[in-house]
Amino acid sequence: MSQSKPGYSDTPVLPGSKYKVHDSERPQPRIVAPGTESGQAAPGRPPSDAVVLFDGTSLAGWVRLDGSPAGWKVENGCMEVVAKTGDIKTKAEFGDCQLHVEWTPPTAITGESQGRGNSGVFMMGIYEIQVLDCYNNPTYADGTTGALYGQSPPLVNACRKPGEWQTYDIVWVGPKFDGDRLVSPAFATVFLNGVLLHHAKALIGPTTHRKIEAYRPHKPVGPLMLQDHGNPVRFRNIWYRPITDYDQG
Ligand code: MG
């Protein structure tokens, strides 16, 4: 231990860092008040440093893909898909992040397979993490709830019953490009209701239906998009925290 601060100054420098092992001068991790657990009746509260994308009161931060006002409705602290009004996206654009989204499929069960409670969380507006009611609803594996759609099934099916609120916590690392060249694919880590669905799973390109698409270069930031697949899925408590390097706080 050094005199005033806990730690050491006679240890080796860590590779790729300006700090030493157990460095007493290394800044303390910043303090973030954690959010509250999400109950079924009410959404949890975001962490203190989250960027709130939907707080239950307004779609002011959301538009249709053509930029016109979002056609979904806001009621009882949720937004709900209004069929045929189209996908919506955030005006805000962001990159690597921790994303939190709560959603619930319709209580009244209609349809089957991909027709039951279908929506989607599109990272950067391009890469879909499937939203679907897969409670007693078999479908193709790579279209299951939480699938990286058309590419990777989730490790497990952790769906709650229709009408119950479900929670996605997603760690998103976007693809990296050098001009037209892909340097690194996108990686997704996804939890559904606290259960791991994907651990740093690489995407093979944009998600799509019945095809495989190659990466196309894009900006390091993009909007969050939610899908109108014709089912009245509801969403609430949507927020993200950008991933920043520890030493750059
Ligand atoms: Mg979908």
Image (cartoon, rainbow, N blue to C red):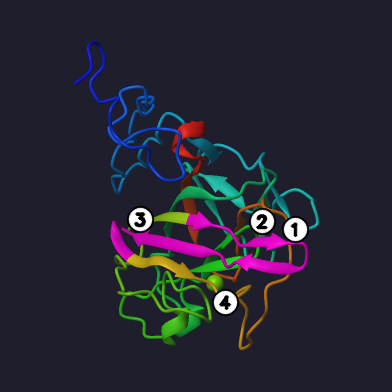
Query: Which quarter of the picture shows residue 168?
Result: bottom left
Front position in the image: 85 or 124: 124
Image x and y of residue 59, in percent: 63, 43
Residue 57, visible in the rendered structure = yes
130 w.r.t. 167: above or below: below
- Mark 4 highlights which residue? 204
Label 1 lies in ligand 1 vicinity (Cβ under 8 Å): no
Disc 4 packing (10 Å; few <14; some 14–19; many ≥20):
some
- Mark 1 highlights which residue? 65
Disc 2 packing (10 Å; few <14; some 14–19; many ≥20):
many
In 3D space, how far apart are the residues under numbered discs 1 and 4 (Cα atoms)?
24 Å
Q: Is residue 67 left or right of residue 239?
A: right
In 3D space, how far apart are the residues under numbered discs 2 and 1 (Cα atoms)?
6 Å
Q: Are marks 2 and 3 in contact (CB under 8 Å)?
A: no
Label 3 lies in ligand 1 vicinity (Cβ under 8 Å): no
Q: Are marks 2 and 1 in contact (CB under 8 Å)?
A: yes
**Between discs 3 and 4, the one toward the N terminus:** 3
Residue 88: assigned label: 2
Q: Residue at x 30, y 49 (%)?
A: 40
Tell me the SS state at disc 4: loop
Which dot, 3 or 4, sits closer to the camera? Answer: 4
Stretch of the chain drawn in magenta: 172-196
**Between discs 2 and 3, the one toward the N terminus:** 2
Front position in the image: 129 or 120: 129
- Mark 3 highlights which residue? 165
In 3D space, how far apart are the residues under numbered discs 1 and 3 (Cα atoms)?
26 Å
26 w.r.t. 96: above or below: above
Image x and y of residue 208, in percent: 62, 78
Q: Is residue 181 left or right of residue 128?
A: right
Q: Kindly identify the amino acid type of the residue bearing the numbered disc 2.
A: Ile
